[in-house]
Amino acid sequence: MLWLTWPGNGLAQGDAPLAAVAGDQTAAALRARIGPPHDETIKAYVAAGATETKPHVLTDREWRLVESAIADLPVQYRQVLERRLGRLSFIDAPSSMGTALTRASEGPNGEPMSDITIRSEVLDKSLSDFLTEKEALLFSEDGSGYSVRVSAGKMSALSYILLHETAHVMDRALEITQQSPPFRTVWTDYRSLAQPYAADPISQTTYRRQPKLPASQAPALYRALGQAPFVSLYSTASAGEDFAELLAWRELSTRFETPLKIQVLDGRGIEVVSVEPLKSPAVRSRLEAAQAALDKARAAAPNKT
């Protein structure tokens, strides 16, 4: 996820018809903000190496998928997006390494707003397939035969991404990861891991701006994750990603009973490592700490979200 900041230039509305859920004005308001990505957002994808990049026009079926994902958001998340979302866009960027880009802007009265742009490829993906493909990008082939498989039940990737990106919107508005003790225990600043995690294998992935790891290091990497208080390796990218992952997985695990299992398989497909972060007491404690930090920040500044 990448933050871009510049003054807002208004909302470009999509042309597709919007099917509102009866009695749900918040969900209807969010559907009305689906539109083409900002020109600067497209430029950012291109600058990051994406090719054949263009706005994605939702089909009728895709509209239904998006509407379903919005309806599945917790009420609190929908309310935050109703106040802070400028537009939700989808983009064709098949060669992009990133999945979602959040553009920070200002509303008509100077209030912080966000435009969220998501790669269209995720619309039809399950969360299991999406995360399996994402973890595979951490490694380079070395002939060892090791591979990683992630199982997350039947949840859609889009629902997870909307939860994750909304957490970023709340974090930006409330400045939670800059101030909250639950994050200072594992972060010395926004991007620097505290010890012992800074010297751990989990600090050596592309999420930490390091080169890809040989696939033969996958078993040691995920064993290390199983001993750490992070719900995912992506959580180690920054305090902001840590917070967003904690909130997203708290909702997925409690509201939808979504499991999370990461397996390292050898060349014969036999499991050599299995990690279930949501069953870790340290991770469970941090899931609740993240929610408590959010609740405290919202109570102290209710008008910010």
Image: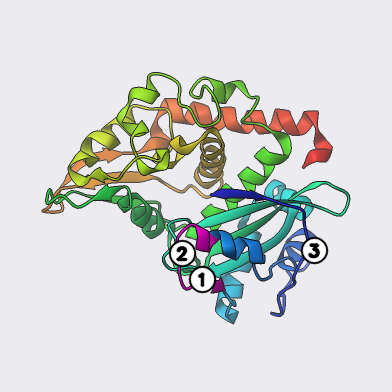
How far apart are the alpha carbons under marks 2 and 3? 25 Å
Q: Quadrant of residue 289?
A: top right
Q: Which mark is residue 10?
A: 3
- Judge depth for marks 2 and 3 and give the one in front: 2
Q: Which mark is residue 302?
A: none
Query: Where residue 274 sits: x, y (%)?
Result: 26, 40
Q: Residue at x 41, y 18 (%)?
A: 195
Q: Label 3 is placed on what type of residue?
A: Gly
Q: Which mark is residue 50?
A: 2
Indicate the secondary structure of the residue bearing disc 3: loop
Query: Which callout, 2 or 3, points at the residue further toward the start of the chain?
Result: 3
Marks 1 & 3, CB-CB < 8 Å contact: no
**Residue range highlighted in magenta:** 45-55
Q: Residue at x 56, y 78 (%)?
A: 61
Q: Label 1 is placed on what type of residue?
A: Thr
Query: Where residue 268 sits: x, y (%)?
Result: 11, 53
Q: Label 2 is placed on what type of residue?
A: Ala
Query: Where residue 207 sits: x, y (%)?
Result: 41, 42
How far apart are the alpha carbons under marks 1 and 3? 22 Å
Residue 81 in view here: yes
